[in-house]
Amino acid sequence: MTDNHKQNLSDQDERLAEENAAKKTLASIKRRELAYSKSSQKTSSGPNSDKSTALMSRKDKRKLRSERNAEPKVELSRRTMLRQRELILITIPFVLYGILFYYIPLGGWVMAFQKYKPQDGLLGSQWVGLDVFKHLFSEASFRLVFRNTLAMGIINLILSFVFAIGFALLLNEVRLRAPKRFVQTVSYLPHFLSWIIVVGIVRDMLSVEHGIINQILVGIGIFDKPLNFFSKPNLFWWIVGFSNVWKETGWNSIIYLAAITAINPEMYEAAALDGAGRFGKMWHVTLPGIKPTIFILLLINVGNVLNVGFEVQYLLTNGIVKSVSETIDIWVLYWGIGQGDFSLGTAAGIFKSIVSIILIYLANATAKAAGEERLF
């Protein structure tokens, strides 16, 4: 018997063992579901059902759901690695890229704990411990830019999710293929425009003299005269939010449209037999079908709530709205590079990263407690 033949037999035995383990796991889950259904029927029919029993049943239900959605465990062995050596070789360049551009630069975080001077370098600069962070949190300007960043991040998060999901739901209801493709293509295009072009378009639309928004609002009688939007600090955050919506809604809707295509068409047929119209199908079939995708993207984007960028804020700002337009990135650009205080700029960047990690863990724990999809 040749070595290749022995290898094939061993691979077949391993596959059979994995299939048997998966079948046993599925059978145990089905037995637990049957036992749960019987116990819930007895509990609902019994006269002494209380809140504690109902609470336990919800916990059991969440546990069963997590076991049902869990991926089968694969034992890490030398044989498994040899069988998947092509995939491992393909991933090596990406792992090296991540180490080179994401992990090695983290060594620069040392500057946040030093009185860093470029001429002394990382090893020769004076070590000051947490003094830089104390100075950072004592700065009133940093607290102000943190408020602005958090507010714009929350507005962008809410608006981007609402408009992307709504656009995907409405576009899914378009039955004619040619108009649907045309609308998709047009909605994707702003994503590929630079922020300089987008800001130019926004300024033209909101212009006092010939802006189309002012013309419409004055024409329908909402305003008596054109409004200078860029002189109103209370409108700046919303201008940034809707600029992001116009630029990214089409692009963000792609993944929701892909998730909608995975919904079983028989679900829509059953809803139609029950008398559901188009909006009824969207509410009772489409939205529950893409709920896992919504939760996963929401968890990912919660971690990016402070990454609102600085391009649109930097290009749209002026002296009147400066108190609400500066973000952490603009503050780091001013102090870290403009003023040459690299330690203070690095400390601000570390603070933003730590807050993002905390938000991801809190959102993931909340989703886990609610029995919904989670990242880890």
Image (cartoon, rainbow, N blue to C red):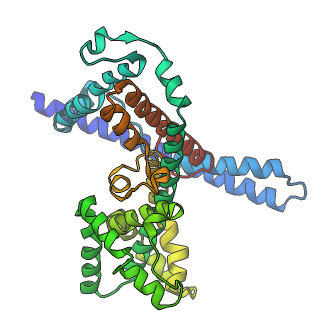
Q: Is 33 positioned to the left or the right of 335 in the image?
A: right
Q: Nearer the viewer, residue 260 or 43?
A: 260
Residue at left 35%, top 79%?
A: 209
In the image, residue 49 above or below residue 350? below
Residue at left 38%, top 24%?
A: 343
Q: Nearer the viewer, residue 147 or 163?
A: 147
From the top left corner, tell me how far across and down residue 128 is, in percent.
45, 13
Q: Is 184 positioned to the left or the right of 153 in the image?
A: left
In the image, residue 297 above or below residue 247? above
Outermost residue toward the bottom? 220
Is residue 291 in sight in this rendering?
A: no
Q: Is 196 positioned to the left or the right of 32 in the image?
A: left
Q: Nearer the viewer, residue 314 or 242?
A: 314
Q: Quadrant of residue 71?
A: top left
In the image, residue 278 above or below residue 35? below
Which quadrant holds the N terminus?
top left
Outermost residue toward the left? 2
From the top left corner, tell me how far across and down residue 91 is, in percent.
21, 37
Residue at left 13%, top 33%?
A: 5
From the top left corner, tell me how far across and down residue 94 is, in percent.
21, 37
From the top left corner, tell me how far across and down residue 36 is, in percent.
68, 52
Q: Is 275 positioned to the left or the right of 334 in the image?
A: right
Is residue 213 in sight in this rendering?
A: yes
Residue at left 81%, top 47%?
A: 52
Total marks in image:
0
Q: Quadrant of residue 201?
A: bottom left
